[in-house]
Amino acid sequence: MYNFFVDGSARTDNGFIIDGKDYNHICNVLRMQVGDTFLVSCEGMSSLCRLAQVHKESVVAEIVEENYRNTELPVRFYLFQGLPKGDKMELIIQKTVELGVAGIIPVEMSRCIMKLDEKKKKTRKERWQSIAESAAKQSKRNVVPEVCDVLTYKQAIEKAAEMDVFLLPYENELGMAETKRALSRIKEGMSVGILVGPEGGFDNKEVELAREIGAFVISLGNRILRAETAAITAVAMGMLHVEMNMEGDE
């Protein structure tokens, strides 16, 4: 079932007005007909809707069932990702949005190969946000996670320090004991920051600075993972912990 995101201005008494690129997608790409059903997500809530009317530049989606499905995690995970080279960031954004992250913060780190000037930061952010929206639609999210501005490492850990739990997966950390302890601290309603390094990993000073502000330095296992694999694994680990321990059996 297709999913479309709108803001509060699109809401009517019993439905939504959809225009712009989503109107084009509904009418000219998907070629939907009156009576077809789809999801509309607005301000954190998804509704099951039917296509009621088709106009020249907009369609009317009539609500069949409000608050149809809540797909958001009861914990807010924020991925702080050291800038990887090439288009790896696109894969990281796509997969971690599917897994349930609340936001993604790109980070400039000492071992980052990719260097972005201000113009490229703006254009990359627009591209990354578009990928986040597409992934949110595909995975039936209730919200589109925000891809934030690129931060320096100092700015990133200051922001991560505001989280209830701050995790730093590190290739030189041995054993899973600290990983288990860190996961056990995650409770419903919390915010959790996960800081993943670029291809070159973390500089020792970066790890120590994170420790000083309370980061749990954890292991993702005995194997050395690529940057994109580490990001996906760390978020998936958190997501599975939450859904297995906080959602209950249905």
Image: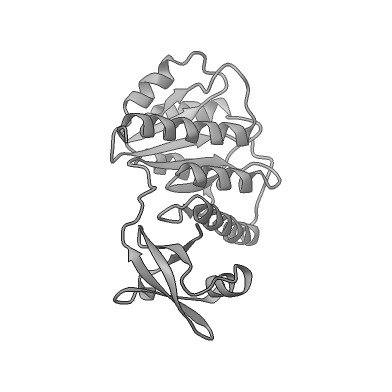
Q: Nearer the viewer, residue 140 or 148?
A: 140
The residue at 37%/34% (across/down) is: 243
Question: Extreme right residue here?
Answer: 86
Q: From the viewer's perspective, is 11 left or right of 239?
A: left
Which quadrant is home to the C terminus? top left
Q: Nearer the viewer, residue 66 or 247?
A: 66
Q: How is the image coloured?
A: one colour
Q: Is residue 62 visible?
A: yes
The residue at 52%/18% (across/down) is: 173
Q: Position of residue 182 (x, y in %)?
A: 37, 24
Q: From the viewer's perspective, is 194 left or right of 124?
A: left
The residue at 45%/65% (across/down) is: 37
Question: Extreme front residue here?
Answer: 35
Q: Is residue 152 visible?
A: no
Q: Quadrant of residue 242?
A: top left
Q: Nearer the viewer, residue 250 or 42?
A: 250
Q: Quadrant of residue 9?
A: bottom left
Q: From the viewer's perspective, is 173 left or right of 127?
A: left
Q: Position of residue 160 (x, y in %)?
A: 41, 40
> How many numbered discs sit on the rendered protein?
0
Q: Nearer the viewer, residue 216 or 100?
A: 100
Q: Position of residue 54 (x, y in %)?
A: 49, 81
Compared with 225, 154 (above or below) is below
The residue at 35%/70% (across/down) is: 8
Question: Extreme bottom residue here?
Answer: 56
Compared with 63, 57 (above or below) is below
Q: Position of residue 97 (x, y in %)?
A: 50, 47
